[in-house]
Image (cartoon, helix red, strand yellow):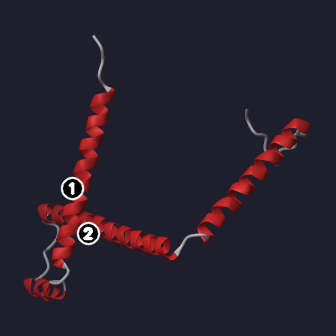
Amino acid sequence: MKRKSIETDEILSVTDQRRLEMDIRKDYLRYNQLSGELHDLDIQDAKRIETVKKIVIVLESLRMMGNAELKYSALLKNKKFDPPDADDQEEEKDDTEDDVPKVKEMIRTVKKDKQDRQHRQRRIHLRGNTTIC
């Protein structure tokens, strides 16, 4: 059943008005319940949420780095872009030597997760396409 908009000029029947009021009450109660659950989070949950946010930020930056690498390699293939000087690259490497193993490990896990997800999707696709002859 379609809900009628309050903004329309049509006059709602009594049953439609009651249904609309009940829907609003249910939505309000659900909102209160969810906001109460959010306030009841303990410190451990808050720390987990912060950790997840940090992981998401790292994954997003890795994705952006991957996109930048693809664009850079495409520019090099088209020879429309001169690579930066070797002196500048050596200075940058000195700053990030400590982070290299961590980033490499994160990239490996992201690639492995992507492969696992693709494998799972392929299995589901194959399972769904079985036909009985």
Q: Position of residue 24 (x, y in %)?
A: 77, 51
Q: Earlier in the sequence, mark 2 or mark 1?
A: 2
Q: Position of residue 67 (x, y in %)?
A: 26, 63
Q: Position of residue 9 (x, y in %)?
A: 87, 43
The answer to whether residue 13 of the structure is visible from this angle is: no
Disc assigned to residue 112: 1
Q: Secondary structure at mark 1?
A: helix
Q: Residue at x 67, y 60 (%)?
A: 33
Q: Using the image, determine if residue 27 lies above or below residue 16.
A: below
Q: Position of residue 38 (x, y in %)?
A: 60, 67
- The amino acid sitting under disc 1 is Lys
132 left or right of 21? left
Q: Residue at x 22, y 61 (%)?
A: 109
Q: Secondary structure at mark 2?
A: helix
Q: Nearer the viewer, mark 2 or mark 1?
A: 1
Disc assigned to residue 65: 2
Q: Quadrant of residue 112?
A: bottom left
Q: CA distance from mark 2 to mark 1?
A: 17 Å
Q: Quadrant of residue 120?
A: top left
112 left or right of 43? left
The answer to whether residue 97 of the structure is visible from this angle is: yes
Q: Nearer the viewer, residue 84 or 107?
A: 107
Q: Residue at x 81, y 44 (%)?
A: 20
The total number of labels drawn is 2
* Discs 2, 1 touching: Cβ within 8 Å: no
- The amino acid sitting under disc 2 is Met
**Crowd class of label 2 (few under 14; some 14 to 19; many from 20; radius 10 Å):** few
Quarter of the figure that contains the N terminus: top right
Quarter of the figure that contains the C terminus: top left
**Crowd class of label 1 (few under 14; some 14 to 19; many from 20; radius 10 Å):** few
